[in-house]
Image: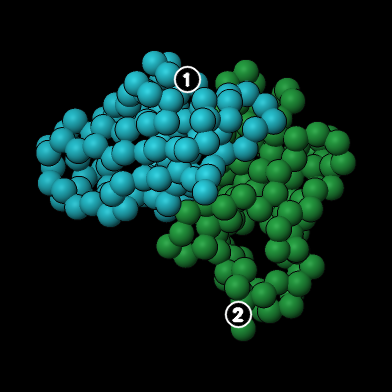
Amino acid sequence: AQSVSQHNHHVILSEAASLELGCNYSYGGTVNLFWYVQYPGQHLQLLLKYFSGDPLVKGIKGFEAEFIKSKFSFNLRKPSVQWSDTAEYFCAVSGGSQGNLIFGKGTKLSVKP
Amino acid sequence: EAQVTQNPRYLITVTGKKLTVTCSQNMNHEYMSWYRQDPGLGLRQIYYSMNVEVTDKGDVPEGYKVSRKEKRNFPLILESPSPNQTSLYFCASSQRAGKNTEAFFGQGTRLTVV
């Protein structure tokens, strides 16, 4: 069965610090990978996605992620966070014929102004 | 505007009183699904539907029912709600099942069962 691991439950950073959130998945076949963001009290919004091609994916709001197939990883990065990036971030993977989306448990990011 | 619409946004109910949360999408998507979000557990899939009249269980289907009579609608039914179903629920849709398709989420329904 597919599963997704997010290494950090809660990350606290100061503004302008660099961010890297870890995500590992388990699935032997071809996968699609996603990062979603959930701002306080809001629904999930897609930050970026990887289907195929260049393993370095750029998303909205200056976020990027790198797919490393050999490590089954899809870590999210941002060079310089802002207070407005305070949110919960979810890594998700889909694979197989049905393509059901499996989520990690989420990482809360708190950015101090 | 392309969107997934859930109603109601907030609901407080009592144990055992049947309720339905509606979900509608205007993108002609084939695939729809329901998730529940609980602190520390992320989102877990309850049920999904690959097309009209085709539904299947996700990871946590107990206590829930769904139907897909029309392409645009995918209601979630709690026949006899219990306090452990207090949660934040999200409906999602995507163009099709399978690869190379992204999910669009509704605004969420916060359900409290007392």
The residue drawn where x is 58% and y is 30% is B95
Chain of the residue where label 2 is placed in the rendered structure: A
Q: Which x, y percent locates residue B30?
A: 52, 25
The residue type indicated by label 1 comes to: Asn
Residue A85, horizontal then vertical, whole percent? 62, 68
Pointers 1 and 2 within a single chain: no
Query: Mark 2 highlights which residue?
Result: A112
Residue displayed at 76% across by 72% down: A80
Task: Report the side of B43 relative to B88 (left or right).
Answer: right
Residue B57, image quadrant: top left
Q: Position of residue B15 (x, y in %)?
A: 13, 42
Q: Few, some or many C-alpha atoms within 10 Å of disc 1 (few <14, some 14-19, many ≥20)? A: some
Q: Which mark is residue B51?
A: 1
- What residue do we see at 57% from left, 52% from top? A45
The answer to whether residue A98 shows anywhere in this view is: yes
Chain letter for mark 1:
B
- The disc at residue B17 is none
Which colour denotes chain A? green
| Res. A50 image quadrant | top right
Q: Residue furthest front?
A: B1
Q: Secondary structure at mark 1?
A: strand
Q: Quadrant of residue A32?
A: top right
The furthest residue to the right: A54
Can you tell which chain is drawn cyan?
B
Q: Amino acid at mark 2?
A: Lys
Q: CA distance from mark 1 to mark 2?
A: 45 Å
